[in-house]
Image: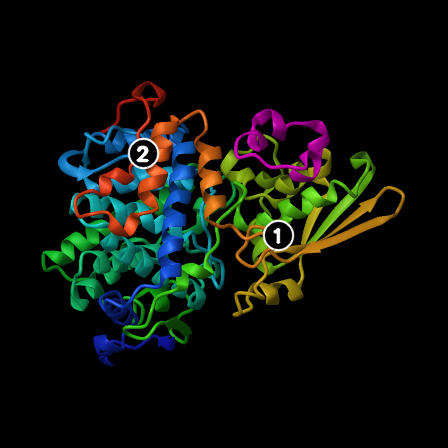
Amino acid sequence: MIVHKIKVYPSKIHLPKKKQLAWKIAEIASDNAKLSKEAIDMVINRVIDNASVAIASLNRKPVISSREMAMKHSRKKGATLFGVNNKLKFDCEWAAWSNGTAVRELDFHDTFLAEDYSHPGDNIPPLLSVAQQNRKSGLDLLKGIITAYEVQVNLVKGICLHKHKVDHIAHLGPSVAAGLGTMLRLNTETIYQAIQQSLHTTISTRQSRKGEISSWKAYAPAHAGKLAIEAVDRVMRGERAPSPIYEGEDSVIARILDGKKALYKVPLPKKGEVKKAILETYTKEYSAEYQSQALIDLAKKLKKKVKNLNQIKKIDIYTSHHTHYVIGTGANDPQKMDPNASRETLDHSIMYIFAVALEDGSWHHIKSYTKARAKKKSTIKIWKSIKTHEDKKWTKKYHDPNPKKKSFGAKVVITLKNGKKIIAQQDKADAHPYGSRPFKRKDYINKFLTLTENILDKKESDRFLKIIQNLKKIKPGHLDKLNIQIKKNKLKRNYKKGIF
């Protein structure tokens, strides 16, 4: 790996493109490096994971709306939509929009956290849709996904967007563009221009994940993927981009991030080096923000220690800066304490999540978020007693560069009415790669079977699981086999008229 120092240059100083971050990313996207067997296996796991959460969300309102929009853009030799008959094809950018929304809706797929946040699995829907429309092979798709993960993970390691309340999809646009460049075997110059256009068009504020969180939380990554596809299409036709997009005097770093005196350090593999960043990412066992995963595990264990929940006086959670300020009381979002809040808000409230997990001793992607569940009096009592605190020790562990030591957990102090304190802590979710029971292929398959139960028939389920595990051998033009079809009468519709 090489750590690249990135800073702003005034316009009067010409910065050669070969010294620009976008070019360095493009170089590794076009280098055709050897593939890691472990990375290939993990790509397969993540495609299964994406399919699990997408199928489970097919009849949720945002996904229905995105599907209705996509279905207005049919194309004879296009891409498929989750749940829809394979004979029907659609423009790849609209398929990416709909499928990306389905993947993101339940907040239940993979994650990588460092200087910033990310859900690298968001790269898969746009790459798959373009691969289908362009009749690419399973190997082509694998290469593209591995590059996309590599780029997004390393941007997240080096550049913090959240500090400036910029949404994390600003790292997704460039990673999708880079992945498409690898998959389509584009030259370095073309990928370079596409990365710049993708970043320029995917800058948006973090309000999509703040306050009264709306369905846009699910749409935002899908929109970034769609914009990246369009950017690649334009530059393939010879168009250019704002440049230098990171280092320019009036560009992203200077005007939106740390400013003209900024210095960022972004690690990237050497040209030709095997890309393994996907192995540093982790999926979710529970449908909730990743920083709540270890706390759900901890709450389930604490339920056995707290014999009478009515005796709880207060609960203090000592955790990292990010957890406290994003999903804790440090966010200062009253909506996070509101029983009438949206599901999108509740899955970003560690106070709600911990209260429910402690009371139920379990977590369910639907039952744990129902209106009745959120309004349960005993739950509200525990919920209102919880306060989070930033602890610098946990913040330091959160940012540890060693994946084995990096922590997304917390220490919990439960104070009972009689003054007794019950104290426990957990560094990592049990399902984390370095947790007590890391997710393996069988766990991904079990998650798929659990989430698609009563939606998929066994024949279709078995067919998908068989073909995805042979992804590398899928021939050009046969990637539509990765789509999962369900009976037409099981897909809900939204008949409200839009523009399309």
Q: Are marks 1 and 2 in contact (CB under 8 Å)?
A: no
Give the label on residue 330, or none.
Answer: 1
Secondary structure under the numbered disc 2 in the rendered image: loop
Q: Observer-nearest residue: 80 or 209? A: 80
Q: Observer-nearest residue: 73 or 296? A: 296
Image height of 366 relative to 304, above or below: above
Dividing the picture into quarters, in which one does residue 100 lie? Answer: top left
First-in-chain label (1 vs 2): 1
**What is the magenta range?**
357-380
Magenta residues: mostly which secondary structure? helix
Image height of 249 relative to 408, above or below: below
The residue mark sitting in front, 1 or 2, is 2
Q: Residues within 10 Å of mark 2 (few under 14, many from 20)?
A: many
- In the rendered structure, which amino acid carries the disc numbered 1? Gly
Number of disc labels: 2
Indicate yes or no whether the magenta region holds residue 378: yes
Residue 454 drawn at (x, y percent): 44, 24
Residue in the picture at 21% in, 50% down? 137
Dividing the picture into quarters, in which one does residue 445 lie? Answer: top left
Indicate yes or no whether the magenta region holds residue 128: no
Q: Is residue 97 visible?
A: yes
- Image quadrant occupied by the C terminus: top left
Q: Which residue is mark 2?
A: 484
Residue 48 drawn at (x, y percent): 39, 43
Residue 69 drawn at (x, y percent): 26, 32
